Amino acid sequence: MVNIIFLCLRNLKLKINFELIKMKNTKLTTILIIICITICSCQKKGCTDPNAINYNSQANKDDGGCEYIQEDFLITGTLNSDKILDPSVIWSMDGRVIVPNGVTLTIPAGTIIKSKPGTGANATSLVIARGGKLFAQGTESSPIIMTSESDDITIGANSGSSLSENVRGLWGGLLILGNAPGSFSGDVTEFQIEGIPASETNGLYGGNDPSDNSGIIQYISIRHGGAEIGEGNEINGLTLGCVGYGTTINHIEVVGNVDDGVEFFGGTVNASELLVWGQGDDGLDIDQAYAGTISNSMVILNDASDHALEIDGPEGSATGSFTLNNLTLVGTNNECSATGVDGEIADYRKGATGNNSNIYVKGFTTGKDIELDADADAVSFSSGNLTFSGFEFSPANYDGNNCFTPDLTNGSIFNDKSSVGSSFESDGITICTVVGDGANNIGADISEFSWTYANEKGAL
């Protein structure tokens, strides 16, 4: 028994006079046994290697069970043939991964991809180039999760414990580029997507095929991305560059991205069931005459967020008209005081053209508005090329009381900032109805987001 005690105490590196223990003192021996058992039992076992995929930051004694990503489960560089990922293992993505023209990447339901950070223009990201295809078909019960290598999520889980929605910029994001038309400065037919250096020709997007097909993308959660490439040049959670309507996109979640949640650069693709939470810039962003429909989608701002919507018009002579339908936009405030970098509802800029209907706005406090940014936008509204209808508005609420009484005609919510003017501000009363929090009849169907990380964390 004394020898066992010696071994335990020496393993614990305790400084004890072992000569005293060698005395056959039963009482002392008993005390030491209790001490040894107590201290040993306090040591939490687990994987203590930070480089392992099952690293346990709470463990202080290694259990020999560390697991590591095998080289076979690493995605890097430009794929030279079709590839199907195995959902029973965790995949690692390192650097800019490109699916080029003629190649298909298939990501089955339940697959977890953890990305290494990279730096600057080499930040880890997945780029589906023009002519490449992505078949990423998660399900409600087994979504595909794209996250950071710092995330301790494990196979079969929906989330880990090491990161929150406030952790951003740990890797890049998902970029899908197509051959559909866009409207570019100089009336060129193709453009280099932001976030990818000009030296990478697989970063080009644009063409003349509105029906272009880049694959099927469903039930994907994209987390903790948006690495900065340079000043004002970050990667969005999901970037869609001239993606055509032959592509299927629905049930996409973006959480904690540095830049925008989802950004549409031209194209004609329709997208539905999009959820953006805690982005650092805008929730949904439209540019370069995007001409598709975004429906049944939701943006939830937090303290880091800018606009829920940022909607730009064409940059060249080509035109396009978007449709936004059945959206829910949720603001952020602290006891009626606005929080967030800007925390605005929506900004329409650069002669935006499209239709906005059945949009529910809630949780925004006074001073946060829907803006026609400049003269071109007022003209677009007055000419009927930019329309608004069927809005409902619930002001921020604290302790059971509304934070302010909304006025739909004085420009505080529907705000025309142009010099030419329009009826936008006075039309607020016909565009929108004020309702109690949760008494809305329009907006997104929240049940469609039950599978998301945001729902798990109570953000809905």
Image: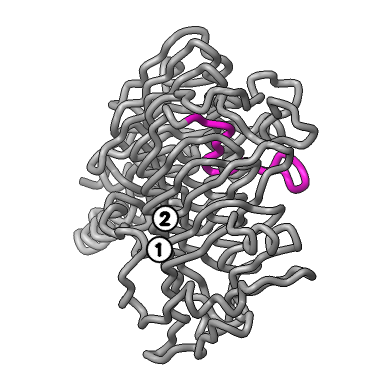
Residue 218 horizontal/vertical position (percent): 35, 36
For disc 1, the marked residue is 358
Q: Which residue is mark 2?
A: 325
Instruction: Classify 10 Å Cα crowding around label 2: few (below 14), some (14-19), many (20 and above).
Output: many
- CA gap between label 1 and label 2 equals 6 Å
Q: Are marks 1 and 2 in contact (CB under 8 Å)?
A: yes
Q: Is residue 448 visible?
A: yes
Q: Which residue: 40% across, 51% down?
A: 295
Of 108 and 22, nearer the camera is: 108
- Residue 87: percent from left, percent from top: 30, 26
Residue 50 rendering spot, x and y as whole percentages: 49, 39
Q: Residues within 10 Å of mark 1 (few under 14, many from 20)?
A: many
- Name the kind of residue labelled 1 in the image: Asn
Q: Which residues are magenta?
A: 228-244
Which residue occupies 59% across, 69% down? 370
- Taking 402 as reference, is 241 above or below it? above
Q: Residue 91, image x and y in percent? A: 41, 27
